[in-house]
Amino acid sequence: MLVSKREEAQRRPHRLQAALRRFIRHRRGSTAVEFAMIAPLFFGSLFAIMETGTLYLKSTAIEAGVEEAKRVTMTGQVASGATPALQLSAFRSAFCNQAGWIISCDAVQFDVRSFDVFGAAAMPNPVVGGVFNPGGLQFDPGKPCKIVVIRAYYETTSITAMIRNDVANLTGGNVLLSGAAAFKNEPYGAC
């Protein structure tokens, strides 16, 4: 049976109304509505888990970098640099060989100090009132047989509100990750 275009145009609103009535009576869409209600919590938790994992990876990389920097400092490879700038460059290079795959090495701040005995190794906290102040950090890899304490600091931002509210240790929601090592330099020269 052939239907004219005019009859087809008249039936179209009725089909639309019928489809709308069926949609309103349809109850199988409740699953989609329920998912829409819990989706923000689900995805927020998922992102928080991923960000926590990323923070742990960065923290582990910083610890590995500190261990490598400790090794080259302890054996005198850092102190063999002619100037403090060359010493810092050798130290940073050793650190970044281990940690540079996940963090920006240019953003890492180092506090390296030498002491005569372990008991004298007092290090001030560079975070005051939730603000990281790198102004008091020093770089002194020490001489043979000296006690050396290394600390590395890396400030990173947090994306999810859960991390910003629960893990952030700086104002503004940023997280300051750190790694440290204390050791005695080897007798690579006269003690």
Image (cartoon, helix red, strand yellow):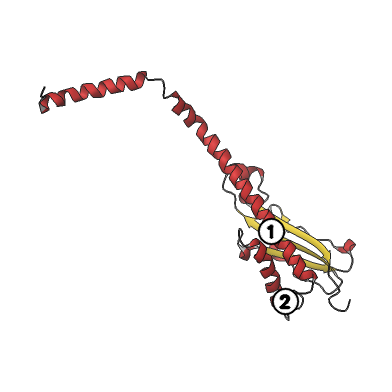
* Above or below, comparing residue 10 to residue 162 in the picture: above
**Residue 56 pos. (x, y %):** 66, 50
Which residue is at the far bottom? 82
Q: Is residue 146 left or right of residue 87?
A: right
Identify which amino acid the numbered label 1 is placed on. Ile
Residue 137 visible within the image: no
Residue 84 visible within the image: yes
Residue at image position (60%, 47%) is 51
What residue does disc 1 label? Answer: 62
Residue 5: name its quadrant.
top left
Residue at image position (23%, 23%) is 15
**Residue 141 pos. (x, y %):** 78, 71
* Above or below, comparing residue 186 to residue 16 in the picture: below
SS assignment at label 1: helix
SS assignment at label 2: helix
Residue 154: name its quadrant.
bottom right
Identify which amino acid the numbered label 2 is placed on. Pro
Residue at image position (35%, 20%) is 24
Q: Is residue 50 left or right of residue 119?
A: left
What residue does disc 2 label? Answer: 84
- Name the image quarter holding the C terminus: bottom right
Q: CA distance from mark 2 to mark 1?
A: 22 Å
**Residue 71 pos. (x, y %):** 76, 67
Q: Is residue 14 left or right of residue 23?
A: left
Foreground tag (2 vs 1): 1
Circle 1 residues within 10 Å: few <14, some 14–19, many ≥20: many
Name which of mark 2 and mark 1 comes first in the sequence: 1
Circle 2 residues within 10 Å: few <14, some 14–19, many ≥20: some
Which residue is at the far top? 25
Instruction: Looking at the picture, tell me which residue is in the foreground, 170 or 98.
Output: 98
Residue 79: name its quadrant.
bottom right
| Mark number, residue 24 | none
